[in-house]
Amino acid sequence: MKILYFAWLRERLNRGEEELVLPPEVGTVAQLIDFLAARDEAFALAAQKRSLIRAAVDAKLAGPDTPLAGAATVALFPPMTGG
């Protein structure tokens, strides 16, 4: 699965994307964020306030309980503002 990072996540992690093979127990967006935090200290620090991270699964906005089964891409980004 391709994980894309945007805005301050990209800056703090010093990468815009990565390819991962997720373990079977990672089945939702929330579990993905937990998995990323457990394997990467920089991500854990960036994700301390989970409410500041939004996700899109295959280009569709997704909540924490959104399943990842069959998804090719997950994008992680801060909340967006209008304007």
Image: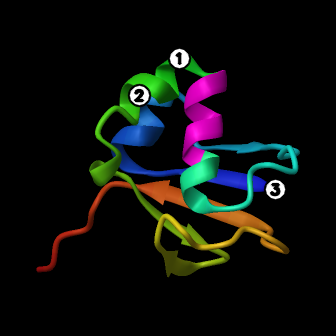
Q: Name the residue nearer the viewer: 73 or 63.
A: 63
Residue at 76%, 55% (x, y): give it: 2
Secondary structure, mark 2, is: helix
Report x, y in % for residue 66: 59, 73
Q: Around disc 2, counting alpha carbons within 10 Å, would you say few (fewer than 14), some (14 to 19), or many (20 or more)?
A: some
Secondary structure, mark 3, is: loop
Residue at 50%, 29% (x, y): give it: 43
**In the image: residue 4, left or right of residue 1:** left
Q: Around disc 1, counting alpha carbons within 10 Å, would you say few (fewer than 14), some (14 to 19), or many (20 or more)?
A: few
Amino acid type of the residue tagged 2 in the rendering = Arg
Q: What residue is pinned by disc 1?
A: 41
Placement of 4 over or under 57, stated as above or below: above
* Residue contact at pointers 3 and 2, CB within 8 angstroms: no
Q: How many marks?
A: 3
Q: Which residues are magenta?
A: 33-39
Report x, y in % for residue 78: 32, 55
